[in-house]
Image (cartoon, rainbow, N blue to C red):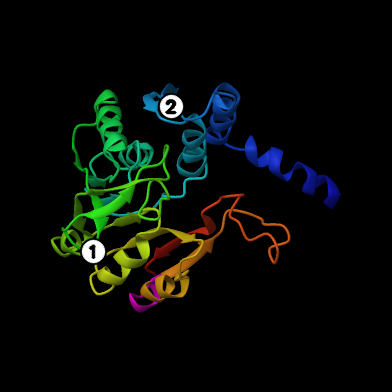
Amino acid sequence: MYWLRYLLKEPYHALSSNRNREFMALLLKYGNRARYQLTEVAFGGFKLNVPDTMSFLWQHKEIFADEFYYFETTQPQPVIFDCGANIGMSVLYFKNLFPKARLLAFEAEPAIASQLRQNLERNGINDVEIIDKAVWTNEEGIWFGSESADSSSIYSTSQKRKIASIRLKDYLEKETRVDFLKIDIEGAEIEVLEDCRGSLAHVQNLFVEFHSYIGNAQGLADVVKVFEENGFRYYVDTNQHRLRPFVNHRYRDNNVMDLQLNIFGWRD
């Protein structure tokens, strides 16, 4: 009966939990909406305005259904750094998991940072520190290209403008303990991690979404080396099954990236 288990594996997973069933319901409700149009969505008692329903759906899948950011701690008020908070899905998840958490949310794109602030206020979350600046290696600003929804980056091919930045290393060194550090900053993670490599000893859990942009050095080995040097055990998930990879070099038909993967790091 292996063939039957194989055929039913994905449908079973899609319906195996309340949050997976919620995702399927959201997919049916919002999946055919036009892309890149401001839309009000609702789920799990939350209401948000999102700039792109498809991006919202996959954020829900990863964050709420698959619980990529789930972690455990004995700290009554865990410290969480959310670098690349976007419209607030990850913040809502963290505050639902740990209502008393002290959470810093960093978002570089000004329009998205405004939506982040509005979404949190709308859902009664008023104790999150929002830093509407790019996470970088200094405070001198950074040239940044704005894209739709969740793909703005320093590697964008759109017209760039200089936006304000913070040095993550400085923020980390102000803390005696960081329970969770999430870094999803669309390609800037390589430089930022290199700058912070000596300032991660007190970080308990580290998540990095790694991006490789076509025409630029990949740098994955350097990122993994930072995990190893700082004593993290880690797990790497590409979250894709690419067919014919020796000739299919694009990440999900993406025109600017050839690899994206998630790295989860924790301490034993």
The part of the chain drawn in magenta is: 227-232
Residue 42 visible in this rendered orientation of the protein:
yes
Q: Nearer the viewer, mark 1 or mark 2?
A: 1
Q: Is residue 108 left or right of 246 when viewed as pictured?
A: left
In the rendering, at what x and y percent does residue 101 appear?
A: 24, 45
The mark found on residue 44 in the picture is: 2
C-alpha distance separating marks 1 and 2: 37 Å
Return the residue nearer the eye: 236 or 110. Answer: 110
Q: Along the polypeptide, which appears first: circle 1 or circle 2?
A: 2
| Residue 115 versus residue 253 in the image, above or below | above
Q: Secondary structure at mark 2?
A: loop
The mark found on residue 137 in the picture is: 1
Q: Secondary structure at mark 1?
A: loop
| Residue 166 versus residue 56 in the image, above or below | below
Amino acid beneath label 1: Thr
Residue furthest toward the front?
Answer: 159
